[in-house]
Image (spheres, helix red, strand yellow):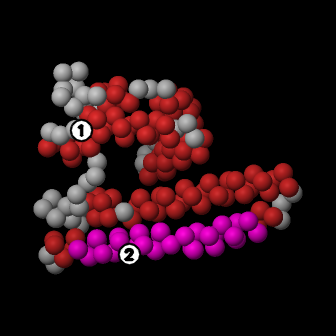
Amino acid sequence: MSTGFQCGSCLEASRSAEKTLNNLKMFEEVSMLSKKVCQALPVDLEIKCLKKSEDYIQYTQSMFQELFHEESLCNSTRLCSNENRVPSNGFLTDKESGGGSCSKCSKTVGKLISDLKDPRMKTKVTNAMLNFCEEKDENHQKCDETVYQYGAVVLDKLEHAKSKDLCKALSICGGGDDEDDD
């Protein structure tokens, strides 16, 4: 089977999955079901149940959308070879071409830092770290303990960090003499 055919098939499948996941009807049905379950609880617990279930539904939807996004799925599985690779919208690819990578990094990291002010986003990031721990077969428990011990502290520090400093630490922005340093 040719690489082009494999890549095309992967892209077609991921687009179909994305289309299905963008259909909110499926998630609305799950939400309605969770509301029925939560309504059976006492009022104080019902409110917590509704909030928690809604957070998990949103988290699950975003995780599935990310998983089946063509760039994530087809490139990470290497079904699309380097020649057929789905172009990335990230600033790292742009860095190689020499244009605007520092400003793109600063803007992207700035948005992430801003998003961390929302407690739901912090929960999503923490859950993503815990999911990463699950994928690590060795030291799974130690990884979880580390996330619980330091995760909140790291996220609080990130929330107060400067995007340009993080981009410099990632070697995307230079020391100040780069043309695209903002």
Quadrant assignment for the C terminus: top left
- In magenta segment, residue 164: no
Seen at 40% across and 61% down, the residue is 67
Q: Which residue is mark 1?
A: 101
User: In the image, is 180 to the left or to the right of 33?
Assistant: left
Give the residues drawn in magenta, as a range: 8-36
**Quarter of the image that includes the N terminus:** bottom left
In the image: residue 98, left or right of residue 118: left
Residue matched to label 2: 16
Residue 49 in the image: above or below residue 125: below
Relative horizontal placement of residue 149, taking residue 91 as reference (left or right)? right
Q: Which of pointers 2 and 1 indicates the residue nearer the eye?
A: 1
**What amino acid is at disc 2?**
Ser
Q: How many discs mark residues in the rendered view? A: 2
- Does label 2 or label 1 sit earlier along the sequence? 2
Percent coordinates x, y for residue 11 in the rendering? 28, 71
Q: Position of residue 117 (x, y in %)?
A: 55, 36
The image position of residue 153, as x and y in percent, is 54, 28
**Residue at x-position 74% and y-position 56%:** 49
Using a 10 Å C-alpha cutoff, classify the residue at mark 2 as few (fewer than 14 neighbours), some (14 to 19) or many (20 or more): some
Q: What is the chief secondary structure element of the magenta stretch? A: helix
Q: Is residue 106 visible?
A: yes
Q: Is residue 146 visible?
A: no
Give the vertical position of 46 relative to 79 (above or below). Answer: above
Of 35 and 137, which appears nearest the observer? 35
| Image quadrant in which you'd find residue 87 | bottom left
Label 1 element class? helix
Query: How far from the left and from the top, in percent, is residue 28?
Result: 62, 70
What type is the residue that disc 1 sits on?
Answer: Ser
**Label 1: few (<14), some or many (≥20) within 10 Å?**
many
